[in-house]
Amino acid sequence: MSDLRSPLAVAIVLALAACSSGGSIAPSPSPGTPTASPAPSASDGDLAVDHATGANDLILRVETGGGFVPIGFIATQAPWFSLYGDGTLIARDDTAPWPEPGPDGLMRQPPLFEARLSEDEVQALLRFALGEGGLGIARPRYDAVGVADAPSTFFTVRAGGVERTVEVNALGIDTAGGPDTAIRDAFSGLEARLRAIAGGLSATAEPYVPQHWRGVLLQAEAGGARVALAWPWPDLTPADFTQADPNGARFASRALTVEDVAALDLGDLAGGIQNVALVGPDGQAGFSLALRPLFPDETG
């Protein structure tokens, strides 16, 4: 696991050094603003933000999803920034272009990367998220006025006595003039700060290797792959995919082990995959499988 050494450490420090520790919800400076100051530290006199410290204890997360997108995208929707209590960061550049589908019609998603932040860096992020980033005073949902079919951004924070998820619809789309303009600007600043960090991980961090996957079983017409694979699991049937997918009750899903996924013989799946056509165990075609990595705090 990477310890965020140069050049990534430089990017992290520059991004975090611009964070203030106040409770203002004013718009933040643009990401990457040069500064000679070190990242804020609990030892610098700032009050430390209390948080759980376990490797599976989620303390800050951002996920973007929903809107008018194909069903396969909803089935594989995943957070692009997840920070845990021990400093583990699992993230990817959510703005990077997706790989083009291969000849088999399969759509592989951009990889996730794993790194480790110091406690000082964790503290700086939490102070910014709860203060200038607006999460400390946010209500659960912010709808956009006059915008339809736009995705939402979901911020989750569990630190400093705050435990909440905030949904912000159409974040980044101009909705100036409404009563929530100031705090939506704060959310945009927080998103930009976290995207700057996530975008720098691919330079030095290691790929995230999940221990479990979520398999979402769809009807065949939701697929589109050119090659149907034989059902690979002698101990599983379609009826075993019984858990409602968190991103849509329409989907049937279940947790799959690394060995279950390896049985598909699809190679490196990186951040997930869509459109895996399967022939049912009875020899009848009609299933499409989507795979999405599970995170340390998730069980299915």
Image (cartoon, helix red, strand yellow):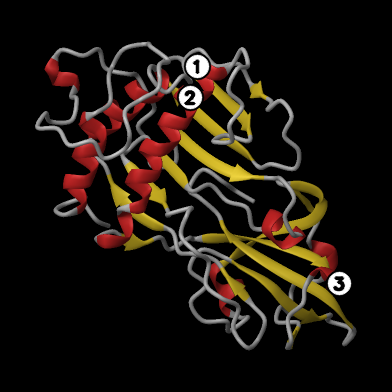
Q: Residue at x 67, y 81 (%)?
A: 105
* Residue under label 2: 185
In the structure shown, which secondary structural element does the residue marked by tag 1 occupy? helix
Q: Please state if 218 lies on the left or on the right of 99 as rendered.
A: right
Q: Residue at x 21, y 52 (%)?
A: 8
Image coordinates of residue 189 in percent, x first then y, are 41, 30
Distance from the alpha carbon under mark 3 to that under mark 1: 44 Å
Decide: is 112 above or below 183.
below
Distance from the alpha carbon under mark 2 to that under mark 1: 5 Å
Say whether marks 3 and 1 touch (CB < 8 Å): no
* Residue under label 3: 221
Q: Specify the amino acid type for callout 2.
A: Asp
Mark toward the viewer: 2 or 3: 2
Relative to the observer, which residue lies in front, 8 or 231? 8
Q: Residue at x 51, y 43 (%)?
A: 297
Res 86 label: none
Decide: is 227 above or below 180.
below
Decide: is 291 above or below 134.
below
Distance from the alpha carbon under mark 2 to that under mark 3: 41 Å
Say whether marks 2 and 1 touch (CB < 8 Å): yes
Relative to the observer, which residue lies in front, 178 or 139? 178
Image coordinates of residue 109 in percent, x first then y, are 54, 66
Q: Is residue 263 visible?
A: yes
* Residue under label 1: 182
Query: Quadrant of residue 108 in the image?
Result: bottom right
Label 3 neighbour load within 10 Å: few <14, some 14-19, many 20+:
few
In the structure shown, which secondary structural element does the residue marked by tag 2 occupy? helix
Q: Please state if 64 lies on the left or on the right of 283 as rendered.
A: left
Q: Is residue 58 visible?
A: no
